[in-house]
Image (spheres, rainbow, N blue to C red):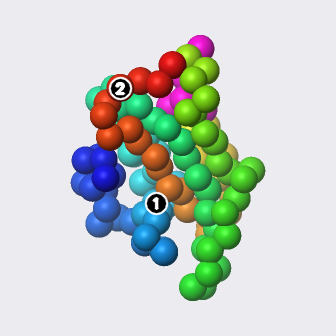
Amino acid sequence: MNSIIERYRNLSIERSGIILFSPKHALMIIEEARNNNIPLLGVDGIFIFGKSTQPSLLNSVDFTLGKSHLDPYKIASDLVKNCKRHNLYFEIVLSETGLRID
């Protein structure tokens, strides 16, 4: 687990082994990753309904395809900021190695 995610873990909800963050905390993690040059590999939006979860492909993005001209931090921040649902949480996937994927 990435050290940034570990530091914010106490602010998360864990479901089926997946660590999920509210939009507010997801934005904090994305910003810290940017500031520490930790590659952002993806953001997965997940709806929480009581004890059930449902992935949201419309609220997810994968940066592992190597499109180096894109700013993954801005794209991810914009995606999370545009979240209008109170039951939408985010899994933030950061690199363990600190190496950019281009």
Residue 34 seen from this side: no
Helix, strand or loop at mark 2: loop
**What percent of the width, then of the height, locates residue 41?**
49, 38
**What percent of the width, then of the height, locates residue 26?**
46, 50
Q: Is residue 45 above or below residue 33?
A: below
What residue is disc 2 on?
99
Q: Indicate the amino acid at tag 1.
A: Phe
Q: Is residue 100 magenta?
A: no
Position of 82 compared to 8: left or right?
A: right
Residue 96 seen from this side: yes
**What percent of the width, then of the height, locates residue 57?**
72, 53
Q: Is residue 70 magenta?
A: yes
Q: Callout 2 environment at 10 Å: few (<14), some (14 to 19), or many (20+)?
A: few
The image quadrant of residue 97 is top left
Q: CA distance from mark 2 to mark 1?
A: 24 Å
Q: Which residues lie in the magenta part?
A: 69-75
Residue situated in front as seen by the camera: 23 or 67: 67
Q: Residue at x 41, y 42 (%)?
A: 94
What residue is disc 1 on?
21
Q: Indicate the amino acid at tag 2.
A: Leu
The image quadrant of residue 30 is top left
Position of 71 compared to 31: left or right?
A: right
